[in-house]
Image (spheres, helix red, strand yellow):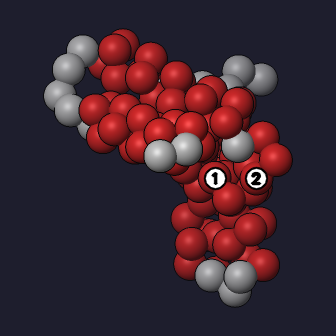
Amino acid sequence: MGSKVRSRITILIVSFGAWVEGPEETRKQIHEEVGRAIENLYTERLEEFYEMLALHYTEAGLSKKAIDYCQRAGQRASERSAYQEAISHLTTGLTLLQTLPE
């Protein structure tokens, strides 16, 4: 099994673990770590992971990064004519934008 495959399996396992009940700060930290791992492992194919990154950074409470990836995920969905999905990502991004200090 190649290192990329092992890395992807690790991300999936950690992602699943992030949903397990536990202290909120622990869940946030796990989501942040998964997001960073995806960014580091898939730098050259990052667009394939915009939706996942938006989710993990939203759950990590990192609104600025989440907003960026929500916008990218929305654009990517729109390009595939997945308009409901695009609206969902962009709405999430707008909601997060409202939580940022002025």
Badge 1 amino acid = Phe
Q: Which residue is mark 2?
A: 45
Q: Is residue 65 above or below residue 72?
A: above
Which SS class for mark 2? helix
Q: Are marks 1 and 2 in contact (CB under 8 Å)?
A: yes
Residue drawn at point x = 70 percent, y = 43 percent: 42
Q: Which mark is residue 36?
A: none
Q: CA distance from mark 1 to mark 2?
A: 8 Å
Residue drawn at point x = 37 percent, y = 32 percent: 14
Number of numbered discs on residues = 2
Q: Is residue 77 above or below residue 90?
A: below
Q: Position of residue 30 (x, y in %)?
A: 42, 23
Depth order, front residue of 61/76: 76
At label 1, counting other C-alpha atoms closer than 10 Å, the crowd grade (few under 14, some 14-19, many 20 or more) is some
Q: Is residue 75 above or below residue 70?
A: below
Residue drawn at point x = 73 percent, y = 76 percent: 78
Q: Position of residue 53 (x, y in %)?
A: 60, 43
Q: Quadrant of the C terminus?
A: top right
For residue 98, side relative to residue 88 (left or right): right
Q: Position of residue 95 (x, y in %)?
A: 59, 46
Residue drawn at point x = 55 percent, y = 65 percent: 88
Badge 2 amino acid = Arg
For residue 58, side relative to residue 72 (left or right): left
Q: Which residue is mark 1?
A: 49
At label 2, counting other C-alpha atoms closer than 10 Å, the crowd grade (few under 14, some 14-19, many 20 or more) is few
Which SS class for mark 1? helix
Q: Can residue 101 be seen in the rendering of this structure?
A: yes
Spot the residue most to the bottom.
Answer: 81
